[in-house]
Image: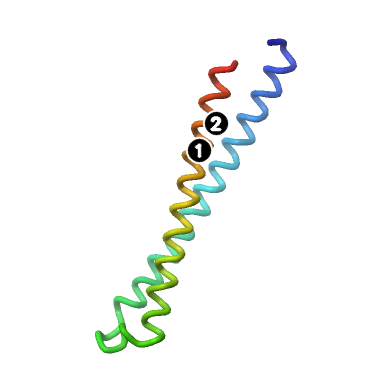
Amino acid sequence: MNKQVRKEILLFKTRLIDIREELEDTADKIQELADDEQDKHDNQPDNLQDSEQGQAFEHAAELLSESAEYLSEATEAIDSAVDSLSEVE
């Protein structure tokens, strides 16, 4: 492997690490939104938790948490890609 290829691999690793950090930050913010929606649901009186609005809060919380989990899985995949690129160097 020549110097130019190693340089390109290093650039790819750097870009992937930056993307990973951005995804991780985004996942954290989405999870915070999910927690807020769940709190809205949980802080309603019991009779309102089953209302349309209460169910909407809970459904939003579930979808947001699911999205955050997908992003977390993506960060794990990026970690694996970076590890593989490190082995190539």
Quadrant of residue 54 in the image?
A: bottom left
Q: Residue at x 41, y 85 (%)?
A: 53
Q: Does dot 2 land on a helix, a strand or a loop? A: helix
What amino acid does circle 2 point to?
Ala
Label 2 Cα neighbours within 10 Å, binned few <14 / some 14-19 / many ≥20: some
Q: Position of residue 56 (x, y in %)?
A: 42, 79
Q: Position of residue 18 (x, y in %)?
A: 59, 39
Q: Nearer the viewer, residue 84 or 9?
A: 84
Q: Which residue is mark 2?
A: 81
Tag on residue 77? 1
Q: Residue at x 62, y 31 (%)?
A: 14
Q: Does dot 1 land on a helix, a strand or a loop? A: helix
**Above or below — where is 11 with respect to 63?**
above
Discs 1, 2 touching: Cβ within 8 Å:
yes
What amino acid does circle 1 point to?
Ala
Quadrant of residue 88 in the image?
A: top right
Does residue 18 appear left or right of residue 63 in this picture?
A: right
**Above or below — where is 38 with respect to 53?**
above
